[in-house]
Image: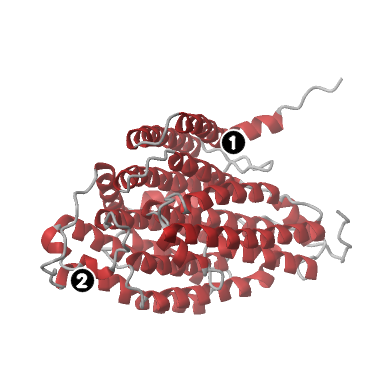
Amino acid sequence: MRPLDLAVPAQLMTALGPDLLLVAGAMLLLVWAAWRPPSTAHQRHVGFASLALALATGLYVISSLYAQRTATEGPIAVDNFRWMADVVILLGTVFAIALTIDDNARQDIGTAESHVLILFASAGMMLLAAAQDLMIVFLGVELMSLSVYALAGINRRSARGAEGALKYFLLGAFATAFLLYGMALVYGATGSTNLGDIASRIGELRLAGSPLLVIGVALMLIGFGFKVAAVPFHMWAPDVYDGAPSPITAYMAATVKAAAFAALLRVWMEAFPAAFDAWRPAVAGLAVATMIVGNAVGLAQRNIKRMLAYSSIAHAGFLLVALAAGSGQAGSALLFYLLAYTLATFGAFAVIIVLSRQDDRPVMIDDLAGLWGVRPWLALGMGILMLSLLGFPVFGGAGFFAKWYVLQAALQAPAPQVALAVILVLTTVVSAGYYLSVVMVMFMKPRPDDAPAPGPTPGLTRAVLLVSVLAILVLGLVPDQLVGLARAGALRATPVTVAPITARAPRP
């Protein structure tokens, strides 16, 4: 009788430890959330327990990061890129739950399930960031998406929220079909769903120009393009972001995007490096269109949530520039960018929550007029966050270095992306039109006499805003330590061997 090989189960348990902790805790909290009738007190209790679970999972991830686990065998990655991506995801999870606790109390939403849905969505995102197999990628996408669809329409009294959730669900299902069909074609071309095996077979069998593979990669890019809100797959974003509760909007704009980009970079760098010349023009084209459309349309927005939605689209274009570089430096640049963007986005939405009213009326940019005169610390924090999203030197803190590292990745790539770097700089200048308009309104425009004063800032919302602003400023002064971790966790393209003769693709 052959001895039982425990290597694979042991590797899976090591790799899935944080995910299992988060899912198991979320299932227990789901039972607790459904056990008692909805109330403000109950949702706060479940919310604080969810915060504790997310923080415990974060400590587990950080311990794994510093344990230097680098095994990559199996369908789940155990490398620093995965742990760094998990840190960004769990940071967004903690911020989203904290903001949701306060916002639910403000809107008199007593359903505690919103906190549990955030935990389940984050578990799917962590699975996405670690996936080394296309089937695991699909499972992560579905777990994340189904939870976020429900979160987008969690406020049942909001007609805009219901409309946005329905649009998100329908277009999301449509995009998932593209993603799954693309995976099927890639499997048909290579005979494998494992990312490393796909890369090896593309090189060994000279499949980089195979029509079946190229179409499969294109369909997968469409599916991921929807998840990151890249143009022209961005149509859902403004309506969904505007209709969803503000903490959920921040969660979708920052954390969902972070997970999707982590998965996109891993799949493209580990599975398709030999087909770089085939997919790079498509990614570069998406980056250009996304940067231009996101920033140009953002100039016309007066609703601040819709303005931040188009800002999110533009930032997706900046991140696509890092992907188009196709180098290990692109991975570290992307991780640092995602962290800085997560901090700035959640901080900005914390301010929006403070300015929101009970009647669910959208917060307009003009509502910030004269904020410096009535709430100077709130205006100062929002000003720093806008400058960070702009990438302004010194006062923008980590936001400046985030764009600087993406520019370096583009210019120092094996095939330098000079044109993309120039477009990134020019569109960043365009984005100053709407970021600086918010700063101008707060500090230079007088406040109308009949404008109501902003309400008090709830404790957890204040904490999220304070942590976001301070972290952005500190990382802007001493980014070296975090950049070193990001570089240690950068993905490397899977080495491939090109066969001297052309071989036929294996039948699946």
Extreme-top residue of the structure: 1
The residue that mark 2 highlights is 441
Left or right? Give the position of 452 relative to 206. Answer: left
Q: Is residue 446 above or below residue 109?
A: below
Label 1 vs 2, first from the N-terminus:
1
Check residue 16 in the rendering and tell me which mark sits there, or answer none: 1
State the image coordinates of residue 430 (x, y, percent, origin top left). 36, 78
Residue at image location 37% in from the left, 69% down from the top: 307
State the image coordinates of residue 184 (x, y, percent, origin top left). 76, 57
- Identify which amino acid the numbered label 2 is placed on: Val
Res 15 seen here:
yes
Check residue 275 in the rendering and tell me which mark sits there, or answer none: none
- Could you tell me how many numbered marks the image carries? 2
Residue at image location 54% in from the left, 59% down from the top: 166
Q: Spatial distance from mark 1 to mark 2, Cα to Cα?
A: 48 Å
Left or right? Give the position of 450 relative to 28. Answer: left
